[in-house]
Amino acid sequence: MSGIEPAIKAYGVSALFLTIYLESFGVPLPGESGLIAASLLAARGDLNIIHVFLVALLGGVLGDSTGYLIGRFGGRAFIQRFGWIVKLTPERLASLEKVAREKGFFMVLSARFVVVLRQLNGVLAGSIGMPWHEFVLANVIGAIAWAGLWTFGPYYFTDFFQKML
């Protein structure tokens, strides 16, 4: 976290928003680590915890929605061309599409908590043609839970963990 903390200290929640937004549609950035660092900075009084939560929520929802739009308008071709990089063979893609059609809402909701899935979630949902309203609802609920956990968890339990050390 030492690499991202100075950026958040220097640029505040703007840096956090950009990191989470970009991470949420596939750019390999430390969004979750940045959120934890920002929460700890808020516990120290350097940032406002409500701002940290709102920026994490907004960055996550908008990033996943951008990913969805990318997937909807070209994601399938992109996945077919570059899926091999993440070992997404045509067979695995077909299997993943089947699961996504059957359990797409819960997949989007829970993918926020799994590192690689968090980055590919929106693109995949858009690529398979998941209905927009279903995606947005699952995306918002998942982002609220994820942002709440990683914002308020470190913020409120910092003292607890310091006592353990």
Image: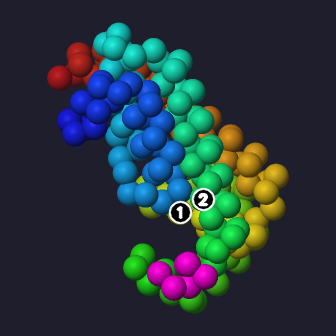
Question: Which residue sits furthest left?
Answer: 165
Which quarter shows the N terminus?
Answer: top left
Indicate the colouring scheme.
rainbow
Q: Residues within 10 Å of mark 2 (few under 14, many from 20)?
A: many
Q: Residue at x 55, y 40 (%)?
A: 59
Distance of mark 1 from mark 2, alpha carbons?
8 Å
| Nearest to the observer: residue 154 or residue 163 | 154
Q: Residue at x 69, y 55 (%)?
A: 106
Query: Quick one: quadrant of the C terminus?
Result: top left
Identify residue for label 1. 120
Q: What secondary structure prevails in the magenta region?
A: helix
Answer above or below: position of 29 versus 71.
above
Q: Position of residue 83 (x, y in %)?
A: 49, 80
| Amino acid type at image mark 1 | Leu
Image mark for residue 67: 2
The percent position of residue 47, horizontal first and vertical second, equals 39, 16
Instruction: Give the secondary structure at mark 2.
Output: helix
Under circle 1, the secondary element is: helix
Q: Judge whether residue 153 is colored magenta.
A: no
The magenta region covers: 77-82
Q: Residue at x 62, y 73 (%)?
A: 75
Residue sitting at the far top: 45
| Kind of residue sitting beneath label 2 | Gly
> Camera-side residue: 120 or 16?
16
Image height of 33 relative to 148, above or below = below
Q: From this viewpoint, is residue 163 visible?
A: yes
Q: Is residue 117 above or below residue 65?
A: below
